[in-house]
Image (spheres, helix red, strand yellow):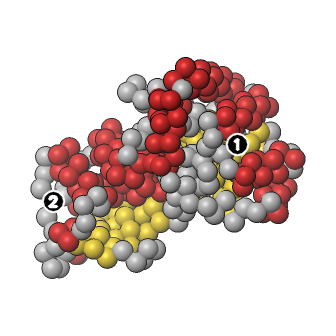
Amino acid sequence: MSSNLAVFESAAPGKAILCGEHAVVHGSPAIAVPVFQVRAVARVRRSDDGARRFSSRNTGLDLRLEDAPDGFWGGALVAALERALAVSLPPFWLEIDSSIPVEAGLGSGAALAVASARALAAFAGRSADDETVNRIAFETEKIHHGTPSGIDNTTVTFARPVYYRRNRPVETFLPAAPLHIVIGLTGIASATGRVVADVRTARDLEPDRYTRIFAEIGAIVYQARAAIETGDLPGLGRLMDLNHEWLCEINVSAHELDRLVAAARTAGALGAKLSGGGRGGNMIALVTPGTAAAVEKALTAAGAVGTIRTEINPP
């Protein structure tokens, strides 16, 4: 195969936040895990028409970068990659496929950026380590979320559980016992950037109250990491429940999310909470192998438009 016909492919998983969302934007820690049951795939080859082209069979996207509107994520991706790798990309055709639901709190934008960055770097003949890919993806995430925390791109890039604190070195870790998680999808689009902006505005109006709440959530995250690393799954479940209550306090839940959380707990989940931006998107439930099916059934009965099972195993 000639170099002009070579295809460079990369894939990246989705992600789910176990605890700490929203507070993480304001300096508290958070924990997130990769979700390998869904993924984004990027394929790059040389363009025949001399353009830089983006396309997706999922969304019907077919766009030349030269004709893209301001704010197109592909422009941010290319600019960040060329700066990071000191390269000028030749004409390319980037094709994207993704099974990650969009605006569902599962890191679809981050996975798209990570997979695309790796495929484009390989196409350009450059090596991009995880730290570099993470920086490129973070710049692209700003298009999706405005002021992202960085946890999505970090979890997707390193594809391991992440204990994340903004502007701190990345900490990945593994559990002492398997984590069995069921994700329930509300089917309601969650515009993370808008919700993050709303929380920021509310914090500016009541700084003392929100500082206290974010500190409480941060303490939950710290305890949750200890529970994960010691295999205390019931303790982790209780912390997830408490985290959900604090997220309700800052008005990022929704009736549909609360209904799914309650259904999961009634069906035997060790704990359940909204995950991600909130006001739609998804919720997560910590289950056991014996309760996973019952929780999935309960979530569907309570209105979930879909469920995803994922598992994070010890080394």
Q: Nearer the viewer, residue 205 or 280?
A: 205
- Cα separation, mark 1 vs mark 2, equals 43 Å
Q: As drawn, is 141 to the left or to the right of 254?
A: left
Q: Which residue occupies 47% across, 29% down?
A: 204
Percent coordinates x, y for residue 272 in the rendering: 74, 42
Earlier residue among tags 1 and 2: 2
Q: Which residue occupies 74% across, 48% down?
A: 258
The type of residue carrying mark 1 is: Lys
Please determine whether, in this image, residue 156 is positioned above or below residue 201. below
Please determine whether, in this image, residue 101 is positioned above or below residue 217. below
The type of residue carrying mark 2 is: Leu
Q: As drawn, is 57 to the left or to the right of 105?
A: left
Percent coordinates x, y for residue 24 in the rendering: 50, 32
Quadrant containing the C terminus in the rendered view = top right
Quadrant containing the N terminus in the rendered view = bottom left
Percent coordinates x, y for residue 157 in the rendering: 42, 45
Which marked residue is nearer to the observer: mark 1 or mark 2?
A: 1
Q: Residue furthest front?
A: 205
Q: Nearer the viewer, residue 244 or 240?
A: 244
Residue underneath mark 2: 89
Q: Nearer the viewer, residue 214 or 221?
A: 214
Q: Which residue occupies 29% across, 61% down?
A: 72
Q: As drawn, is 106 to the left or to the right of 246?
A: left
Percent coordinates x, y for residue 252 in the rendering: 61, 43
The disc at residue 273 is 1
- Mark 2 Cα within 10 Å, few/some/many (few <14, many 20+)? some
